[in-house]
Amino acid sequence: MAPMLPRLLVTLLIGAYSDPNTPILTPSQVQYLSDMRVAAEGASKSAEEELLKEFKKISFRTGMMLNGGSRAWKLALMPAKELLEQFKAALNNLEYVSNFGVDPVFRKRHPGEPAMDFATIDKFGYIPNMWELRAAKSPLVNGTSMNQWNVLESAEKGLYQFPLSSKPLPVGPTATEAKERPHYLGGNLRSIDVGLPRYGPYSAVVRNDVVRQRAAILAGDSGGWENGCNSSITPVTPMPPMMKARFDCDAYMGNGKGRPIPGTADHQLHSVLANVKFFDKVGGGYERLKGLLHTASYLPRLVHQLLDSEAKATPFETLLYTEAGLLGPLRPQDMKMIVASFSGVYGTPQADILREFCTKHQVPLVWGLNGGETWSAPSKDPARLGPDTSSSVDVAADRLLDESSLALTNATLLNRNALTKAVWDKVSKDITAKRASGEASKLQASDFIDWWKKLKSFGVPIQNLRPGDCASADMCLGTYHPSADTKDCVCKRDGLDEWKVAAFTQEGQSAQPEKVGVVVV
């Protein structure tokens, strides 16, 4: 007998897309999530025991120290149980992102990626999945090959095991059946400021409560596994044999028999452990350290990156995310914020469209520096995405709240005055003028870094959420310093009626926020 549906999941049936009478999920999807959660809890518990054993090993402690820095040493000396609790707390804060807005050049090399724009999102009332675009005969997916559709079909039926009613390809799914399909999210394990820039300059960060309620989680990119590990389908782009040998295809399944046990946001240790084993030979364990190729395990590397805000990552490691399949629509109200590439978008006409969209839908707009590079720079240079490159990417780099979004959050800009406005206006005009001139191609990362520093001095820099920062990550974007001696949580304003946000002193002490309501999807 199937377990009784949790009350929280049942409430999802009375949610809406854009029409309040349209259910968010079908009954079969609600049942799927209920059954999956039971299986995920057991699998995650087993993985917790395995992780605790790993954390006690000398080899793990040595691997932590090899990452360098004072924080790495402190983590290496921390008792295993305490380290595990911090690791779990970091996963509870983990961001799940949907990047979009790829350009035509990128789509030519990666035809499976739709060129999503804000007009399309407004037309649907949410970010449509690729199957919905296909059913609507949208030109956004015209370049998507049948091999790519087969990859998606195989992942959704075989890996996620979603309840799907559509006929096999090439017939289905219809417009109605396409709503049964997931929207793909990336678990931003390394807290990259612009999410997954490979897939576009705009990163919609999904509310954590939405992910907990409606998403299934796998060890890594399902398309990557299907292309590189599934011999029963034709890959979109065959993986070179030497590269394929470095992935442990069986490890992707975790402790599932023949197929994964999908995780949930609150029961995902087995999915993360499978991520570690699947990517062990391409993650930090094989990074060049001081000119030598060392073989320390990828696990201490990931733990360090999750728990140390001063950690670094290789460009390749930004692709080693966990993947979540979100059931139901990804609507503006499901977004915690949109993070846009500062060097890719700021000062362009698209920035005005972006601000208008965020203001209209009350989604805070935040900028990510991405090291001063345009969003697609790593994608245009395959050599930089090799698994053995140096660590050049900042983990958990600060973001910057756009002035237009101050009213959408609880943040207070204490030094907001005529000078503040003058600085922001001047920087905006300078970038716009440079982009419009013939010198646009000459812009360097250092130019954007200089402009960023000016805005940061007269704005609201947001630090990534760390374990213990805020009572809930559901509606909070991160933390900031409204004054020299305080650290506050920056939260989306429509969540302030449900939560009293606490201020944190530099010593880390605070009164815990009192929950006075429930955030409902």
Image (tube, rainbow, N blue to C red):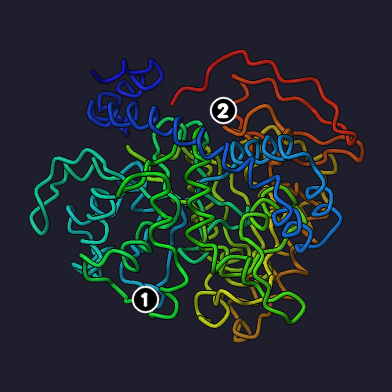
- As helix, strand or loop, the secondary structure at mark 2 comes to helix
**In the displayed image of the protein, which residue is found farthest to the top?**
516
Residue 96 image offset from top left, x and y in percent? 51, 46
Above or below: residue 507 compared with residue 201 = above
Residue, x 25% and y 50% (percent of image)? 158
Above or below: residue 497 compared with residue 409 = above
* Quarter occupied by the C terminus: top left
Classify residue 37 by image quadrant: top left
Above or below: residue 462 compared with residue 140 = above
- As helix, strand or loop, the secondary structure at mark 1 comes to loop
Observer able to see residue 333: no
Identified by mark 2, the residue type is: Asp
Give the left or right position of residue 283, taking residue 17 as reference: right
Q: Judge by depth and name the residue closer to the eye, 472 or 311.
A: 311
Q: Residues within 10 Å of mark 2 (few under 14, many from 20)?
A: some
Residue, x 66% and y 65% (percent of image)? 296
Looking at the image, tell me whether mark 1 or mark 2 is earlier in sequence order: 1
Residue, x 70% and y 50% (percent of image)? 57
Residue 515 image offset from top left, x and y in percent? 63, 16
In the image, which disc is placed on residue 494? Answer: 2
Give the left or right position of residue 46, taking residue 9 as reference: right
Identified by mark 1, the residue type is: Met
**How many numbered circles are shown?**
2
Q: CA distance from mark 1 to mark 2?
A: 45 Å
Residue 189 image offset from top left, x and y in percent? 58, 52
Residue 93 image offset from top left, x and y in percent? 61, 39
**Marks 1 and 2 in Cβ contact (< 8 Å):** no
Circle 1 is placed at which residue position? 239
* Quarter occupied by the N terminus: top left
Classify residue 81 by image quadrant: top right
Classify residue 373 by image quadrant: bottom right
